[in-house]
Amino acid sequence: MARTTLTRFLIEQQRLANALPAELRLLIETVARACKTISHSVSKGALGEVLGSLDSENVQGEVQKKLDVIANELLLDANEWGGHLAAMASEEMETIHRIPNRYPKGEYLLLFDPIDGSSNIDVDLSVGTIFSVLKAPDECAGREVTEEDFLQNGRAQVAAGYAIYGPQTLLVLSVGTGVHEFTLDREVGSWVMTDRDMKMPQGKCEFAINMSNRRQWSPGVARYIEERVMGAEGPCGVDYNMRWTASMVADVHRILKRGGIFMYPADHRTPGKARLRLMYEANPMSYLIEQAGGAATDGFIPIMDVDATSLHQRVGVVLGDKAEVAMVTAYGKE
Ligand code: F6P
Ligand code: MN
């Protein structure tokens, strides 16, 4: 049987579901192509002199890894000239990147985390690229795009996905018609579909949380985890397993394939203090998880309903298994 490549899948989506305007198809192909190049850089490691940190910090005050900057530049360069975008925003840039005047402009806004989980690069664990696509508001035609134009909630996303640079390089994508996985065939250089219409398994007893933050959890989160750690002897009556990769892409991908729940709750002692970023981490992952039959909240309301107030806004994240997410949310309300 003929293999379904990413290009073929996107063209079929354009024809069958009529879900995919040509410009959006071009955008996704361009991001996917950039991810191939990033994958190549990541896999060269020390031989490509891409490991280690720079002297710089990003807007979040995090030390930038060399690969953070390389991947950011690759995504900007790849997406600048195609005519499909109005502007871009990235974890690695304080403010938005407008398309230079020498290029035509399109109607989409692209947001990305160029290398998610970058603390893992130097120790050869999985990292990834997360992206989210919004439509530029109609009223910004004919004027300069502003940061406010990006501040739409997650429900407004028209596509989202991630690439994961692990033992295999994968692209996991949704344009609103289910979630699909493509594996990079390095010999041919193309993305080949390896999982269609992914549905995350429900009822699996596995959680992912950084336990070292225990003192910052709300009583609801602490109770939820405590009950799971008690296993068969506790109120759950069953043993739970725990995994924490410290790369959101890797943890979310595992949950998509194998089930369970991922949590990076907000610090309940400090209002507004959380780790993960709404616009280019939590929203795209929530879009994928909901499309795959799971749920995603900030501990209280669906993440995609959270109002966007700034580009680098942080948010608590509880996502994965529907019943487990509902339980955390219920405990939080008690
Ligand atoms: O992008 C932030 C991130 O690297 C996520 O990929 C990951 O889930 C989290 O931070 C890990 O945080 P910590 O180092 O606190 O476990
Ligand atoms: Mn990240």
Image: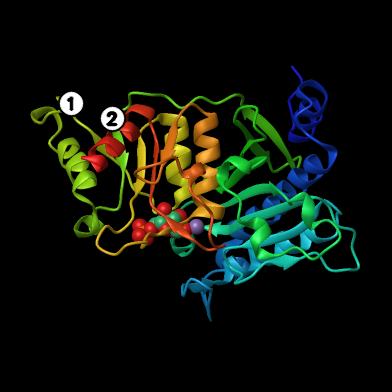
* Image position of 28 (left or right of 174): right
x and y percent of residue 111 in the render? 64, 55
Give 88 or 52, whichever is nearer the viewer.
88
Most distant residue in the bottom direction: 55
| Residue 182 image position (x, y, % from top left) | 64, 35
Looking at the rendered structure, the kind of residue marked 2 is Cys
Residue 130 seen anywhere in this rendered image of the structure: yes
| Image quarter in which the N terminus is found | top right
Residue 8 image offset from top left, x and y in percent: 79, 29
Picture disc at residue 6: none
Mark 2 crowd level (few <14, some 14–19, many ≥20, 10 Å Cα): some
Q: Amino acid at mark 1?
A: Val
- Residue 310 lies left or right of residue 320; in this view the side is right
Ligand 1 quarter of the rendering: bottom left
User: Residue 238, labelled with which disc?
Assistant: 1
The extreme left residue here reads 233
- The extreme front residue here reads 139
> Residue tagged by mark 2?
205
Residue 124 visible? The answer is no
Q: Quadrant of the C terminus?
A: top left
Task: Determine whether, in the image, residue 31 is placed left or right of residue 203.
Answer: right
Q: Residue at x 84, y 68 (%)?
A: 100
Q: Answer yes or no: do the residues labelled 1 and 2 have beta carbons within 8 Å?
A: yes
